[in-house]
Image (cartoon, rainbow, N blue to C red):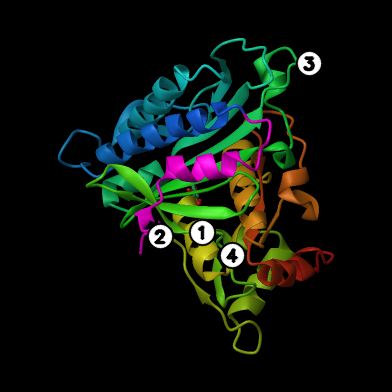
């Protein structure tokens, strides 16, 4: 149910203004920036909701820097975000998962300049079969003392000033944090506005659900296999399994209901499949703000990882704090023969 304050719905714009008050020296530029992202996601939602009626199914014909088939909707989403953010005077650098290199929009040298990174349409291969997809974004300050976009974007996740995602699911929901809690908005197609529907979200400390692609079980490192065996065993966790195969959908379920998601290293992708900057950092920021945890390679907190390249990948274990602790007890153990 949409939340009301003094009898009125709370829009995303209003909420950002309220949050703005937490940043005494903010100049209102930040909310202008976020409104550019929400505008783009409304455009993306309109295409996603008409897939099949308009020609947005299938491949565009090229492969991206990740070596993945580019879907028609990937291009539309990428263009919508770059177009709406391109006119926001305080965006210094844009980095998209779809593009080879970070794109310097403008050399903005005042303090209020930002870097925006995004995965414009995560899980886009699910579009053709009507499964939820998502947009993931993260915002950093653009450091004045570092020259060159390639270097400026290489910041640890702990330096994020905001992060969020939009899930194009049974409804279109936007979830974001700017370090003061996690808040959810639902797009009202009649108003064309995102209305506050959950505020100060807290992930349940524990839940009996795990989420992983078990097809790769035999290529996971042995401690992960041991955890998964325990998690489903009646004398172990006795957990059930849910796996959509669209990261934003799997994460959102865990944010609301608890549980654990993992994408371990595999033989094919020993560094993990998921992208550190565009996927894991934003979701880790949200998870921790909601009381959960997010762990990357070598048991390191995702938000502490120092990126080497904007397209770095990482293994990911994310979710309810006690579920992650349980898993890490197995994963941190020495490999057994
Ligand atoms: P797999 C989608 O391609 C994606 O990047 C994430 O949305 C999702 O969690 C993951 O890949 C699914 O990967 O190997 O299970 O198909």
Image depth: mark 1 or mark 4 in front = 1
User: For the point 75% across and 65% down, which residue is it?
Assistant: 328
Asked if the residue at tag 1 contacts the one at tag 2, i.e. Cβ–Cβ closer than 8 Å, the answer is yes
Q: Work out how far the residue at label 4 is from the one at label 2, CA to CA, in angstroms.
A: 17 Å
Q: Work out how far the residue at label 2 is from the one at label 1, CA to CA, in angstroms.
A: 8 Å
Circle 2 — which element?
loop
Circle 4 — which element?
loop
Q: Work out how far the residue at label 3 is from the one at label 4, CA to CA, in angstroms.
A: 37 Å
Can you give x and y, in whole percent of width and height, for residue 115 in the image?
61, 25
The vertical placement of 96 against 268, above or below, is above
Viewed as shown, does residue 183 lie left or right of 49?
Answer: right
The vertical placement of 87 against 48, above or below, is above
The boundaries of the magenta stretch are 1-26
| Mark identifier at residue 318 | none
Mark 4 neighbour class, 10 Å CA radius: few under 14, some 14 to 19, many 20 or more: many
Where on the picture, by quarter, is residue 111? top right
Residue identifier under label 1? 199
Asked if the residue at tag 1 contacts the one at tag 3, i.e. Cβ–Cβ closer than 8 Å, the answer is no
| Mark identifier at residue 202 | 4
Q: Earlier in the sequence, mark 4 or mark 2?
A: 2
| Mark identifier at residue 3 | 2
Considering depth in this image, is 212 or 152 the residue closer to the camera? 152
Viewed as shown, does residue 153 lie left or right of 83?
Answer: right
Viewed as shown, does residue 307 lie left or right of 65?
Answer: right
Image depth: mark 4 or mark 2 in front = 2
């Amino acid at each position: 149910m949409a939340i009301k304050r003094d009898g009125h719905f709370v829009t995303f714009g209003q909420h950002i203004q309220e949050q703005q008050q937490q940043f005494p020296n903010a100049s209102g530029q930040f909310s202008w920036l976020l409104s550019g992202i929400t505008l783009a996601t409304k455009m993306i939602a309109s295409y996603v909701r008409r897939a099949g009626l308009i020609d947005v199914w299938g491949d565009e014909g090229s492969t991206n820097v990740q070596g993945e088939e580019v879907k028609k909707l990937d291009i539309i989403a990428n263009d919508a975000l770059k177009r709406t953010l391109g006119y926001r005077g305080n965006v210094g650098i844009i980095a998209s998962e779809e593009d080879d290199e970070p794109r310097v929009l403008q050399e903005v040298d005042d303090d209020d300049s930002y870097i925006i990174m995004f995965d414009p349409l995560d899980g886009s291969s699910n579009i053709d079969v009507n499964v939820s997809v998502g947009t993931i974004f993260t915002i950093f300050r653009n450091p004045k003392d570092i020259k060159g976009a390639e270097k400026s974007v290489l910041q640890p996740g702990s330096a994020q000033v905001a992060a969020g995602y939009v899930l194009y699911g049974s409804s279109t929901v936007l979830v974001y944090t700017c370090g003061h809690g996690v808040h959810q908005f639902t797009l009202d197609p009649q108003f064309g506005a995102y209305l506050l529907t959950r505020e100060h979200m807290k992930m349940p400390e524990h839940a009996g659900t795990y989420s992983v692609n078990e097809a790769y079980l035999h290529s996971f490192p042995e401690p992960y296999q041991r955890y998964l065996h325990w998690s489903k065993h009646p004398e172990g966790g006795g957990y059930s399994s849910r796996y959509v195969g669209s990261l934003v959908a799997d994460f959102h379920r865990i944010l609301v209901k608890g549980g654990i998601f993992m994408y371990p290293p595999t033989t094919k992708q020993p560094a993990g499949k998921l992208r550190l900057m565009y996927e894991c950092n934003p979701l880790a920021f949200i998870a921790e703000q909601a009381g959960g945890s997010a762990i990357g390679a070598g048991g390191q907190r995702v938000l502490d990882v120092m990126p080497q390249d904007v397209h770095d990948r990482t293994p990911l274990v994310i979710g309810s704090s006690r579920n992650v602790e349980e898993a890490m007890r197995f994963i941190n153990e020495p490999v057994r023969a």
